[in-house]
DNA sequence: ACTCGGATTCTCT
DNA sequence: GAGAATCCGAGTA
């Protein structure tokens, strides 16, 4: 994929990211999945619709510094004491938009993913990569190893690729699991995909 | 230094 | 549908 794809506001790039391929090089081999669910998080330069749910809301910190860097890079954060979640940075350098990858449909390395998740090798796709914490565990993505890496460097163990697959219907809805700005329609998912996380009824 | 709560998931019932 | 597991970042003092 091209750098300029990500040098855009996250709410613009996020729906276009659906159907693209996320790949990770691990000690056991390459793993890959098709992106089927994402959420956009707006940078603090957006003043008309502030996004207090974004980690960049209060400005640069050591934790979120990657979000303020150039587009197409990997921001990984640790959550709830147990899980990692992976984002792609958006906007030109200096602005801090990001896209959270919430779900993948596995396309390569399902058995390794299952092993990484502690599941039987025949585990269903949604149990492998249906959810932001699950997909990081399945792909072996962690903050110490992958935060700050470039998705677009051909030598990078993290790759964002495009094949000629075109998505069908896209569903737009509020983001999941957040308290602030919970009404903004910034979640994008492929309709009728088994790996898309179900919307929790409060 | 201390406190609070979270861009989650699992295991029950 | 509820509760647990579990830790770090950020805010306050």
Image (tube, coloured by chain):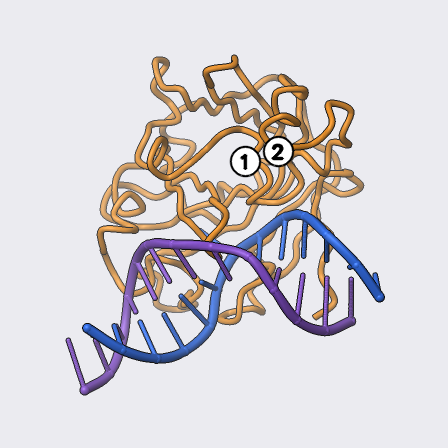
Chain colours: A orange, B blue, C purple
Q: Are marks 2 and 1 in contact (CB under 8 Å)?
A: yes
Give the chain of mark 1: A
Depth check: A185 or C10 in front?
C10
Residue linked to disc 2: A117
Residue visible at 28% across and 43% down in the picture: A66
Residue visible at 52% across and 14% down in the picture: A28
Please state if A78 lies on the left or on the right of A150 as rendered.
Answer: right
When the figure is inspected, residue A74 is found, relative to residue A157, above or below; the finding is below
Residue A85, how many percent across, how many down?
48, 45
When the figure is inspected, residue A99 is found, relative to residue A31, above or below; the finding is below
In terms of secondary structure, where does tag 1 sit? helix
Q: CA distance from mark 2 to mark 1?
A: 6 Å
Q: Could you classify mark 2 by the number of other residues whose Cα lies within 10 Å: few (under 14), some (14-19), or many (20 or more)?
A: many
Q: How many marks?
A: 2
Quarter of the view holding residue A194? top right
Please state if A147 lies on the left or on the right of A61 as rendered.
Answer: right
Residue linked to disc 1: A137
Quarter of the view holding residue C13? bottom left
Residue A164, how many percent across, how many down?
63, 17
């Amino acid at each position: 994929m091209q750098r300029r794809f990500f040098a855009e506001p996250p709410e613009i790039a996020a729906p276009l990211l659906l159907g693209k391929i996320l790949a990770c090089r691990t000690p056991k081999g390459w793993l890959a999945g098709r992106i089927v669910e994402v959420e956009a998080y707006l940078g603090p330069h957006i003043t008309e619709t502030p996004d207090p749910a974004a980690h960049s809301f209060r400005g640069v910190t050591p934790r979120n510094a990657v979000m303020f860097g150039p587009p197409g890079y990997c921001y990984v954060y640790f959550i709830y004491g147990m899980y990692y979640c992976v984002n792609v940075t958006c906007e030109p350098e200096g602005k801090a938009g990001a896209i959270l990858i919430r779900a993948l449909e596995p396309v390569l390395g399902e058995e390794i993913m299952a092993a990484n998740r502690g599941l039987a090798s025949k585990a269903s796709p949604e149990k492998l990569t249906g959810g932001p914490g699950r997909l990081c565990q399945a792909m072996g993505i962690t903050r110490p190893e992958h935060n700050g890496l470039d998705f677009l460097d051909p030598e990078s163990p993290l790759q964002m690729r495009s094949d000629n697959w075109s998505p069908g219907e896209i569903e737009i809805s509020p983001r999941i699991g957040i308290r602030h700005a919970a009404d903004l329609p910034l979640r994008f998912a492929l309709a009728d995909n088994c790996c898309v996380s179900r919307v929790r009824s409060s």
